[in-house]
Image: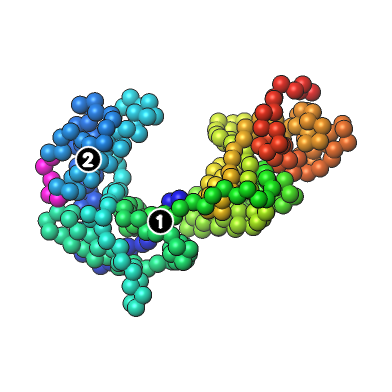
Amino acid sequence: MIRKSTVNLKYANAGKLQKVHTTAIEYQRVINLFIDSLWKQKQFSGKFVKNTAVESRLSARLRQAAAKQALAIVKSQRKKKRKTKPKFNKLVMDLDSRFVTVTQDLENTFDIWIRLTSIGNKIILNLPSRKHKHINKLINDDWDIKKSVRLRITDKGYFLDLFFQKTAPPIKTQGKPKAIDIGYKKLIVSSDGEFLGDNKIYEKIAGKKQGSKAFKRALTERDNLVNASCNLLDLSDTNALYAEDLKNVKHKSKGKIRKSFNNKLARWVYPKVLSKLALTCEERGILFKKVPPQYTSQRCSSCEAICKSNRRGEIYKCACGNIMDADLNASLNILHLGAYSPQVSYSKQVI
């Protein structure tokens, strides 16, 4: 298992940050030189760059790191079957233990230090930072800090991504399966009848001017609510969790639904829910699996008849007599599809 946690480098003095910035700009330039060379040579595979001889004030080691990062970018471009040469526009450096040493200092105001070396011109930088709740949790839970880091410069400042690793526990054999339906109005509805989260935060975001401080605060509040809702999901007696394999739900929705609703829907972050729960399950030894979403909201969880008109807003009402919350009905269908009927066919008659 690998987890990422970010520390802020804003506590370093301006002179040190300026050196970091100029190094990152040169690193970006060198990466693009390597991309040009790789693209010209049609080197889209392998582990090493054939020619790393580029003129730069960066150290030979850092040029090698830039070459490796350039090769990864080119490989990614080809994997996505894109025929245009990529351009690296970010100020991001992937660094290993040759360049970075991370140490903890429990006796001073700054309890974590980042030492940068071998970057060129005999520059050595000691950058102070502070740990936060997430890092402390990972350390207390016996996660090991990896030797590789990612240094990023954005319009928000200077950051260092630390990576932690730990052996994943074996998948639990005891317990029972559970499924969830992820929705816009009710964030999570489980097959056990748990209703977590609502859409009030999306209304709040829609009422803020995009790009404003209030808008950004609302987005942060939304992400915190997503995490809180996921944490409230009871997985104590669960050995497998099933969810819909949602993809491109909001794709091409513009013009098909009301503008006011589309504005709210655009802030719906179902991928964050799936990602959060996948990580939680991995840490707790719970199988996490996504199943096809077809007909889960139209199928009756009792008799399995499929009828689009059976769903009436928040209620699902079937001719067989099954009447229940529509999202709960969907979560039960997801459970049946994932745990009890993995080979279920969609050839049943659609009414």
Residue indicated by mark 1? 164
Closer-to-camera residue (27/173): 173
User: Is label 2 or label 1 in front?
Assistant: 1
Closer-to-camera residue (82/199): 82
Closer-to-camera residue (47/95): 47
Q: In this view, does 201 lie above or below 50?
A: below
Mark sitting on residue 197: none
> Rounded to the nearest whole Å, what is the CA distance between mark 2 and mark 1?
25 Å
Residue indicated by mark 2? 67
* Horizontal and vertical percent position of residue 63: 18, 45
Apparent side of residue 239 relative to residue 26 in the rendered image (left or right): right
Residue 14 shows in the view? no
Q: Which residue is drawn at 55% across and 31% down?
A: 252
Label 2 environment density (alpha carbons within 10 Å; few <14, some 14–19, many ≥20): many
Magenta segment, principal secondary structure? Answer: loop
Apparent side of residue 281 relative to residue 152 in the rendered image (left or right): right
User: The disc labelled 2 sits on which kind of residue?
Assistant: Ala
Residue 23 shows in the view? yes
Q: Which residue is drawn at 15% across and 60% down?
A: 123
In the rendered structure, which segment of residues is drawn in magenta?
54-59
User: The disc labelled 1 sits on which kind of residue?
Assistant: Phe
